[in-house]
Amino acid sequence: MKKYFIIGAIVLVVGFSINYKFGGFDKVEPQLIEVDNYTIYGRSFEGSYKSDALNSLVDEMRMKQQQIDSNANVVIVNYIDEAKETLGIVSNFVGITAESDIKFKDLQKKIIKANKVVQVKVKIKPLVMPSPEKIKALAYELAEEKGLELQGLSIEQYLGDGTLVIDFPIKGEASYIEKLAEAYGFSNFNYATTCHYTFNVKKGKTGVARSWVWQPNTGAVTLISNGDTTSFNHSNFTEDQKKLDHTFINDKYWLLFPFQLMWDTGFTYSIKQNVESPISKELLTKLIIIYNNKDGYTPGDAYDFYIDEQLEIKEWSFRKGGKVEPSLSTTWEDYQIVEGVKIATNHLSADGGFQLWFTGIKID
């Protein structure tokens, strides 16, 4: 039997697996409601919905939820993938959500953008609880009736009174940043378990090469440089590892900056049309990003992207501290598609004195 979302795992944890034989008898009434995005702190999981590792992860989030406040809830995001589900495999993000930021260094922060959802509320109880298939079918029926398209995921929140709330986010009109990230394969990267790449940079006669192995789901990072190997966790590093994490973030931003605009929240942006680019002098769309003090190590930095009509970045400028004049402008060129992810592998300054490029890119 297909398990469309992780409710199956939680039901098993609390001893209600008998429900699947009956499909439930409670009446379910999906509703269309407005929401204001989701900010979730947790970790990714992919594997069997019956896995002990999944149950342990859910239990861990319950314990963390109890350490915060009564407004925090355990949340499970389930990415619907029928091909994997036929094999009994689920792809989830398990975490907690609260009204204010959660200060757990070992948790990753995920933002799911949604303005409307189809919401279903059920009581967790044996025999009468409806099956995941029934809930999903009713949610999709309502969306189709309203002429709406769902995002292909569900968000489950476990409330303290024994209520399970399942939200199915609706696709809205994508923002320019969302469209840009998707043009670079953002959805494809959601399934990445390991990312390998070597960051190379040359300025004048000085050159540096750093090889990275990064596991986005766990935060584990390994650096190989000058024959030395160093490992740490990007989600939970020590004060002594802060400089190392800073280096990792710098190199990752160069590799996947369109995705960082989906992962980060501490910035504002604006768009200007038909602006002359700094190197080619071509008229392009200018996307201006200005960071505040919420994300990154250098608040106030600004980035100007120069983008063509096909949503391909052609050039960019970095303005340290938000200064008017660029600190550095380079091209974005020599694109490669790696497992559905589009990456500019070469960046050159106008005079050729600065070059940054990537080799050994592999995404599993």
Image (cartoon, rainbow, N blue to C red):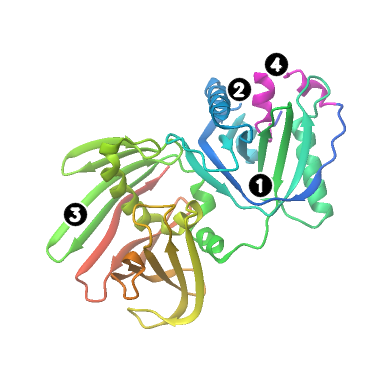
Q: Nearer the viewer, mark 2 or mark 4?
A: 4
Q: Answer yes or no: do the residues labelled 3 and 4 have beta carbons within 8 Å?
A: no
What residue does disc 1 label?
A: 152
Give the Cα distance between marks 2 and 3.
Answer: 46 Å
Quadrant containing the N terminus is top right
Q: Label 2, secondary structure: give it.
A: loop
Give the residue type at disc 4: Gly
Give the side of residue 134 with respect to residue 60, left or right: right
The residue that label 2 is drawn on is 50
Which secondary structure, mark 3?
strand
Q: CA distance from mark 3 to mark 4?
A: 56 Å
Label ID, residue 208: 3
Q: CA distance from mark 2 to mark 4?
A: 12 Å
Q: Dot 4: what SS?
A: loop
* Residue at x-position 55% and y-position 24%: 63
Q: Is residue 235 above or below residue 51?
A: below
Give whichever of 170, 34 is nearer the camera: 34
Give how far across and how far down residue 232 sits, in percent.
Answer: 31, 35
> Looking at the image, which residue is at 65% across and 31% down?
6
Question: Label 1 amino acid?
Answer: Gly
- Which amino acid type corresponds to the residue marked 2 in the rendered image? Lys
Give the Cα distance between marks 2 and 1.
22 Å
Please tell me which of labels 2 and 4 falls first in the chain.
4
Quadrant containing the C terminus in the rendered view: top left
The span shown in magenta is: 3-24
